[in-house]
Image: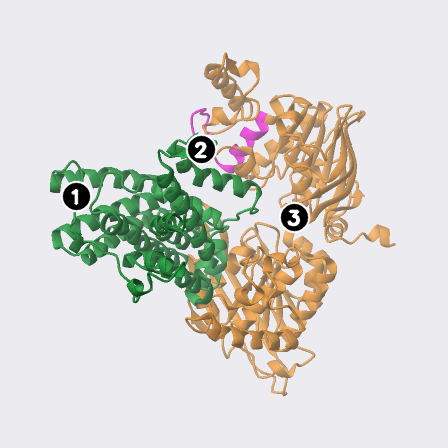
Amino acid sequence: MLDTIILVLDSTFRLSTPLLFACLAGLFSERSGIVDIGLEGKILGAAFAAAAAAYVFQSPWIGLLAGIMVSVMLALVHGYASISQRGNQVVSGVAINFLAAGLTVLLGQAWFSQGGRTPALSPATRFESLTLPFADTLANVPVLGPIYANLISGHNILVYASFAAVPLTWWIIFRTRFGLRLRAVGENPSAADTAGLSVTLLRYRATIICGILCGFSGAYLSVAQGAGFIKDMSAGKGFIALAALIFAKWKPVNAMFTCLLFGFLDALAIRLQGQEIPGIGEVPVQVFQALPYVLTVVLLAGFIGRAIPPKASGIPYVKERT
Amino acid sequence: MGSVLCFSWGWGNAFETVYFESRNEIDAQVIDFIDQKGRATVAESNVPAIELIGVSKSFGPVQANKDIDLVVGKGSIHGIIGENGAGKSTLMSILYGFYHADSGTIKIDDKTTTIPDSKSAIAQGIGMVHQHFMLVDPFTVLENVILGAEGGALLKDGVANARRELKRLADEYDMTIDPDAVVGELPVGLQQRVEILKALYRGADILILDEPTGVLTPSEADHLFRILRVLRDQGKTVLLITHKLREIMDVTDMVSVMRRGEMVASRKTAQTSMEELAELMVGRSVLLEVDKPEVEVGKPLLKVEGLNVRDDRGVMRVKDVSFEVRAGEVLGIAGVSGNGQSELLAALSGITRAESGKMELSGETLDLSAAHNAAEMRTKGMSHVPEDRHRMGLVNKFAEYENSILGYHREPKYSKGMFLNKDAIRKEAKERIEKYDIRPPTTEMTAAKFSGGNQQKIVLAREIECNPDVLLIGQPTRGVDIGAIEYIHNRIMDMRAQGKAVLLVSVELEEIRSLSDRIIVMFDGNVVGERGPEATEQDLGLLMAGVNQEAAE
């Protein structure tokens, strides 16, 4: 029983990681007032670039870097459209999603001729699991041993990085000057402007951070969790991350728990696939896949109260009043 | 400026500035300003804090500021008064670096300077309290105050410092406030205090307040004025933008009057009066002789009782207003703009919901606190020419013929099954263009391309030709040239002759006086008095400032 629980929780961590990166990415962006529907596209673009670069240069680190670069570039496109050109942020985000979905497959086919996939990565060119100190020696200690050895230890570095990013994000948002200004432009850009701050610059910086974090998310999918890029491998994670962000009320620590919850549902879905549940029978896997969305709607509607987004999110900042 | 015009009398603490008059031909007059109280803090300074020379700014075809000259003495409270749209806010936004002047010179402390952005304004010691507060609601007072001036990359470096400084400012200026309170949960009076503290925290020597009392209760306003006097006595310069005459008389040392983008006069407050300022503000427009024949007045077609209207911010804008308009009568509502007239029109025409109040329209009683809409009011025989034709009267991007049926598009004569009968619409639009002399005579040009007067005629034609019993008409001639004004006035007189009831809202006193059979004056949401059309401009001007002389006597 304990083994099963540990197994499910272990895969919860691994499935939460890309969500968490994307959710924090969205948090930076939306806190600055830029709604980002394009998380999905950035993740996908980064996943492709990371896998391709990791294969070509035979290094997961270069893969990660390439993923981040592509994701930041897409983020800058979104920034240019929605900050400089004051365009509709949802339209721009959707466009990025389509662009990434099409371009990854097209380039993948053109470069590697494997039906849009990238060649499979060997273990050396992926982020491998790390064994934490004493994991093996402590494995035999009852209860705590397996938890440490199997649950805490044995993940790749990006998993740890995603969870380390949570307190870091909290600290940046709530404890630094940059964070204060970021929150100010997301709530009332005119206030920031009249305080002598550049709304444009602040929003671009947030957008770039969003790009970097999506880069991590994408690279994790193709170079850590998977071993190469597969068509549409982000599979809606960007959208689930957005749901998680609303669920978390745009707060980093909440975001972590929400992503863990959604990751857990995912892990459960995989675990219960094709298995009989006593009294109910076999539940279609789609039920579990739909659960994050259903939960978001249900819980937001009744249980955790209203989620109030940053007031200026989605609204381009126009300085001139006439 | 400089040594020729500014000199000291040589006795210790006297402070003197020779004041430049604007280039207005009527009021050319030089005023010298001697501070009788001789405040020690401003003793040595005979340099103006702010000097503007020939500042102009236009937005597209609209000239918001025309060749503005202004001198503001250091350590004084200087009022800028003018109606809404006179260009006061634009001028102050230029001073705060929010807009850039198209031409002209700005001098701060006698040094020519440019103010490219707010950051630079702050650096030059200018602080601004905006009409709509520039505060971040979910932030605490402290966070709002330090935003942009955090004093270090980490918040904790600056916060302790700021807390101390805030306490010092609060004590010094009698502005106590809880630094950890969330701004969005504070009453507006305290939010405004946060704005002032924000400016002072950044070391502002010149404080600009844009319509600061619009959202305040009278006692909050009094407290604000006490604070402003303290600030002045400490040597700060205060620029107070308002359209309320009483505030100017209460608190300022000097006052400059703006009208239609121009600075028309400057006065020492002690040497002027509300009457004079009201006259300068409203302006003596060309008197148009309107032919007003005797008309038999019939039964009331519109009756309003106990109307109260609250705006989006929760401020009561119309307070217990009652009146009636009879057939063949024009009732004029005078008042300085922003005293509840717009809200009154919006509530009567069904656009907004009133707090309470009843309206009797063509014999039917309606509860205005219930939801109504403009279409419903139209079917009941009420037409509405809104005050702001660009925002409410027209869709600027639509063609003339499309605009000519806005709001009436459901009528069967404009439809062909589920489609619009464009031929019929165009035909009717053409007839109206001819009848109302709309130029150029085309149905296809977009509304935006017509001149103001012709745009107004499009709206007027639409609202009059449907033959209403009651016509609500707001600012019928705002931004309209002289020829069209005459035409529009005559159309209103025609309505009166046909036995319709007309409710006319205008900030142009001359217009109100020449068209109305009765005049009621609104001030701060209240009806402060009723007069006949023979009432003098001075009398009405005082009422507009909230002073009812008749009642006082």
Q: Nearer the viewer, mark 1 or mark 3?
A: 1
Q: Is residue B126 above or below residue B98?
A: below
Q: Position of residue B473 (x, y in %)?
A: 65, 34
* Of A102 and B405, the residue lying toward us: A102
Q: Is residue A145 above or below residue A312?
A: below
Give, as a three-letter code, the residue at label 3. Answer: Gly
Look at 67% across and 65% down and name the residue there. B224
Identify by letter the chain in orange: B
Q: Position of residue A254 (x, y in %)?
A: 47, 54
User: In the rendered image, which residue does mark 2 sit on?
Assistant: B397
- Element on which disc 1 rests: loop
Using the rendered view, name the quadrant where residue B519 is placed.
top right
Look at 30% across and 66% down and name the residue there. A134
- CA gap between label 3 and label 2 equals 28 Å
- Disc 3 chain ID: B
* Of A179 and A139, the residue lying toward us: A139
The answer to whether residue A91 is visible is no
Region of the chain picked out in magenta, as a range: B440-462
The answer to whether residue A276 is visible is yes
Q: Position of residue B310 (x, y in %)?
A: 69, 44
Residue A118 is tagged as 1
Q: Quadrant of the C terminus of chain B?
A: bottom right
User: In the rendered image, which residue does mark 3 sit on?
Assistant: B338
Q: Is residue B452 magenta?
A: yes
Q: Is residue B48 above or below residue A298?
A: below
Identify by letter the chain in green: A
Give, as a three-letter code, the residue at label 1. Answer: Thr
Give, as a three-letter code, the residue at label 2. Answer: Lys
- Disc 2 chain ID: B
